[in-house]
Every structure is written in structure tokens, then in C-alpha cells.
Amino acid sequence: MTFGTPKAVLDYPAELPKNRLGLAKWTFDEKNPLAARVAVNRIWQQFFGFGLVKSSENFGSQGELPSHPELLDWLAVDFRESGWDVKRLVKKIVTSAAYRQSAETTPNKLEVDPENRLVSRGPRFRMTPEMIRDTWLASSGLLNPTIGGPPVRPYQPAGLWEETNAGDGRGTLTKYVQDKQGKLYRRTMYTIFKRTLPHPFLTTFDASYRDVCAVKRQRTNTPLQALNLMNDPLMLEASRVLAEKLLRNKALPFNEKLIAAFRQAAARQPSDGELAVLKKHYEVRKMELANHPDTATQLLQVGDSPPDKSVDPVETAALMETVALVFNMDEVICK
């Protein structure tokens, strides 16, 4: 048996050792046409939802041709000549006219470019579960920015972890012990991952099972996703924490509180119509919860962080549910 690389890509130089070092040098040889193009294509995919080569997992003979071959070539050469500077490439993409377009579409655009392969409009697709969860944390102020360290165990339905373990004697692997306080609010990338039982929120929103390499994720739309978005404990807790923060600011007029909540999540000013809908929802829920104060109190108990007793529980619960509406807007969970 002999070792080699695909000659159709680049002959393996005789002077290179046939080991991992040699393979690395062959991969990043300036004559190798693949490495820079594959890397650029995957980074483009992260921002636009698809690669210039749609089959980003397959650059072989069975893959698709690039939609913009000259652009792919130029970005790849520029990326390689910059010293493989990822930050520079990302800046180039996000400041481009193609990326900064409006995501609004027209009947003509849908007819000519239904999948937006021609980049006739800005990207619009649902964010990954990691991004959605981190958006809730960041918008509410709960996000723990600590970098590195061991994995954490956030909220998860009781009993799931134990159902996938047979027998005892494996310590923490047989029982799921939820973390407390700051660890609960780490970025989602630090969530412990068990291949036989990935975190339910990640699974529901199409995260990879990690049993095989996944270059891109599928995107589905299911009723379970909507149910999860409206009832996830972290989303409800983040909504409550942001509502409490706004209500503690007595000098801020109520309309300004709603505007602040909207801007925290959607990063823009709400229209008059949107503001009216939010205000009406708050007033209706406040009236209903005033007649059922126990329901309001129970709602505020969701999450590990204790509710703020300095603010009115009925007002907090009503504003919490209003913030939850904002957190569930397509504009907030979509890129």
C-alpha cells in the first residue's frame, strides 16, 4: 500500500515527507486550488446561508458548480495572500454591498432568483440554536462572558439524561446535575454535549449530532420549534430579567421601556404599529394578571435567578410576556 493525494488536485511533491506534516504542506501549497476556496466558501455560507458553491460539503465531481466562479477565485487568492487572515475576510464580506442589501424581496426577485443564489437581496434565514439562545442571554444582560473552562449543564427536562444511561457506577455521567448561578448563562458553545442525548433545544433547531462531520446544517420548520421558543425556561427567565431591569428605571416613560426592550432584541427602533401592538398586549395581560395574582407570581418563578421583589409582580409578569413576544419575532430569531 502506498500513500498519496488526488493528482487531479495537485501532484504530491516528491520532497515532502509522507506524513501529517507533508500533508499539511501539500494542503496549503499555493498551487493547491482547493484549500482557500473551500475555506472561503464555508465562511461565505455562514453569512449568506449558502456557499458560492452550494454543495459546500462536496467540491468533487459530484458537487455543484459555483454560482460566481470569478468571485470565489478572487476571494480565495486574496485570502491566501493575506496570510489566511479570517478576520480580514469576514470584514470584507460584511462590509460588501452584497451583504448590506435589504432582505426584502419582490415577486420579480422570487421568480428570477427564488433561492437568492444570485444574491439579489440580503440574506435571511433562521439562526442556529446557539445564536438564538445567546441572543436571549445578551439582550437580557444575563450573558456570562467568561471564556474557556469545562462544559456547563444548563436547563434540561428532568430524567432525559438518566434514560440514556444503563446501570450505575459512572459518576456524573449517569445523572444530570444542573449548574447554578453564572454557569447557567454561559454561551451555548459551552453546553455539555452527549452524542446519545444532545441538548433538546439544540436538537429541536437542527444542531448536528456530531457523530459525523457536518459542514452545513439543514433548516426545518416544525410546530415543536414554535412551542419551544414560547416556553423555553431560559427565554422566559431572560424576558423577566429584562422586564425587571426596565421597571426599575422609574424615570423612563413606559413607551420608552417598550422601545428599549425592542431595541435590545431587534437592534432597531419599533414602528408606531409595532409599538401599539406591544402596548396593547401589555395592558391586556396586566388586567388579566391583576385578577389572578397567583398566576403572575408563579410565572416569575421560572429560572434559577430569584425574582426582583422591588418591582410589582403583576407589572413584571405582564411586561415579561410582552418582552417574550419580542424575543419570538422572526426578526430576532432570523439573520
Image: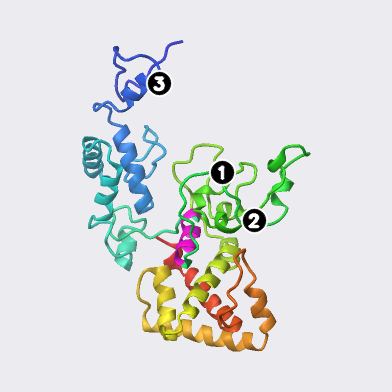
Q: Is residue 153 above or below residue 109?
A: above
Secondary structure under tag 3 reads helix
Which mark sits nearer the N-terminus, 1 or 2? 2
Q: Amino acid at mark 1?
A: Tyr
x and y percent of residue 267 in the render?
37, 68
Q: Is residue 223 visible?
A: no
User: Within the image, what quadrant is residue 32 found in?
Assistant: top left
Q: Amino acid at mark 3?
A: Arg
What secondary structure is found at the residue carrying circle 2? loop
Residue 249 percent location from the top left of the image: 45, 80
Q: Quadrant of the C terminus?
A: bottom left
- Of mark 3 and mark 2, the one earlier in the sequence is 3
Assess whether residue 131 is covered by the magenta stretch: yes
Q: Secondary structure at mark 1?
A: loop
Q: Which mark is residue 20?
A: 3
**Viewer-proximal residue, 7 or 252?**
252
Q: Find the magenta span and give its range.
A: 130-139
CA–CA distance between discs 1 and 2? 17 Å
Colouring: rainbow
Residue at the image position 44 percent from the left and 80 percent from the top: 258
In this figure, which residue is indicated by the disc labeled 2?
156
Kindly identify the residue that appears in the image at 49 percent across and 80 percent down: 247
Which label sits in the foreground, 3 or 1?
3
Vertical comparison of 275 with 177: above or below = below
Residue 153 is a magenta residue? no
Q: Which mark is drawn over residue 89?
A: none
Mark positioned earlier in the residue sequence (3 or 1): 3
Alpha carbon separation for disc pair 3 and 1: 28 Å
Q: Which mark is residue 209?
A: 1
Foreground of the two, 311 or 105: 311
